[in-house]
Amino acid sequence: MSALSSVAGSLAEAWQELRVHRLRVLLSLVVVAVSVAAFTAVVALGQMLSQGFQEQMERGGGRPALISLTAYDAGADPSGAPKTPDGTALDAAFQRTTERFGVEWTSRVAWLDAQLPGGGFAGMQAVDPDFGVMRRVPIVQGRWFTDADADRLVPAVVISENWWKSLGSPAMAAHPTVELSLSTWAPDGTQTAPVQAEAVVVGVTTSTDGPDSYAGYVIYEDIVAIAGPTISANADRQAWIPLEGADELMEALRVSFGSSLSSGMQAEAYRTDYVFQQEQGYDPFGPMFLVLGGIASLILALGGLSLLNITLVTVRHRIREIGVRRSFGATGARVFISVMLESVVATVIAGGIGIVVVILGLRLPIVTETIFMGLQEPPAFPMSAAITGLLVSAGVGALAGLVPALVAVRVRPIDAIRY
């Protein structure tokens, strides 16, 4: 009980000293508030940008754990060329395998070239509806594919934003259409004869390349019906499986997929998600965290040094006061704790003010729209950054108050007479 009373008394005394020396405290508060605010902002932005970068990488490599199943015939036909695999059989084997293991998210992916009426080209992918979730395809207008789109009389497409703008930015409710001349590649590397098709635009996704580069997606089954089964032979077959035990499940899927194929076919499986890259020793977020961590540490060090300088000056001006307190029986430990707590209390208050400013600033619409534009799930402010900022402000206060507290302990009652 006495220990709690002593701590409470020291806190009350520290608060009273802060009120008495409010001008010097204000200077230290400004320095610490700016330093902690900058530190918290860097930490928060690092975590928020990491989430944004993660979403961007999931668009390219898929959500963890995303695997691809492929198969090829190691033999050759009588002419010496590689045998053309039966795409229909591959699709059937893929469906049986994923159903057997209860994989809910799957998509077949084939690549197409589309020649446009105006003479331009668009790179397109034929996919299943699950692809949009597996790859986090962002939609800025309209919607992504649904299972019902496969029953349309006219194929449905999702096109890039710059392609949509080239059409005059038509409303999705008007059911705009595009004329396509589609071609793909045969397993021997030759391009197939183009097939003419008209498609209705159901959605618009963000553009990833230059303003003159168009891209889009079309439903896989529609392209097979239009262009024939040749497209299936070169398609990639992807599945999104749980991250825990992903390697074991991937191997089981590969074995099952291969056993469902005809003799001579070799099945392979591999992962494309960023978590797998990290497991292989490549950390895409490592350089960013090193840079942001260095900036945060530098800001904190400068703020701590400024606070240390101010607190030392403050103690030098209080030698008479401390000497009088020692003459009235204040112990060295009491003086040490009092001076130390003054610094800690001041920095925690300043840190709290700085953190509130950062939280309000990062929640401004102009900030979120500028930094996290195009993300499906804009990250919220990480509270771990706020907690870290408070802990760091208390730590900086303790470190900055250590030297002044030691100086204050060495003040003797006789020193009060000199000042």
Image (spheres, rainbow, N blue to C red):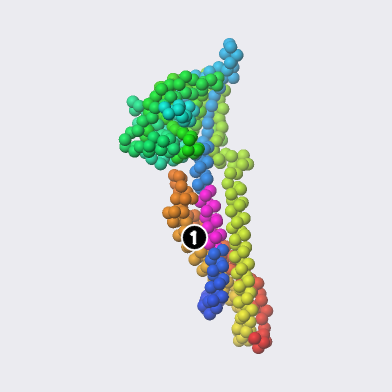
Magenta residues, start to end: 36-50
- Location of residue 44 with respect to 105 vertically, above or below: below
69 and 177: which is toward the camera: 177
Q: Is residue 348 visible?
A: no
Q: Is residue 47 left or right of residue 127?
A: right
Judged from this view, the residue extending furthest toward the top is: 78
Q: Quadrant of residue 279?
A: top right
Q: Left or right: 189 with respect to 169? A: right
Where residue 97 appears, x then y in whole percent?
Answer: 48, 27
Is 41 contained in the magenta span?
yes
Report which quarter residue 269 is drawn in: top right
Q: Is residue 82 above or below residue 358?
A: above
Task: Please tell me which residue lies in front, 254 or 361.
Answer: 361
Q: In this figure, which residue is indicated by the disc labeled 1?
A: 358
Q: Main secondary structure of the magenta part?
A: helix
Q: Quadrant of residue 284?
A: top right
Residue 70 visible at all: yes
Instruction: Say which residue appears at 62% left-offset and 84% top-offset.
Output: 320
The disc labelled 1 sits on which kind of residue? Val
Image point (63%, 76%), residue name: 313
Q: Residue at x 56, y 27 (%)?
A: 268
Of residues 91 and 19, the one drawn nearer to the viewer in this rendering: 19
Vertical placement of residue 335 versus 30, above or below:
below
Residue, x 38% and y 30% (percent of image)? 178
User: If the image is split into quadrants, where does the C terminus sit?
Assistant: bottom right
User: Percent x, y for residue 236?
Assistant: 51, 28
In the image, farthest residue toward the front: 118
Secondary structure of the residue carrying tag 1 is helix
Residue 11 is a magenta residue: no
Q: What is the x, y in percent for residue 214?
A: 46, 34
Figure check: 156 above or below 414: above
Local packing at callout 1 (Cα closer than 10 Å; few below 14, some 14-19, many 20+) is many
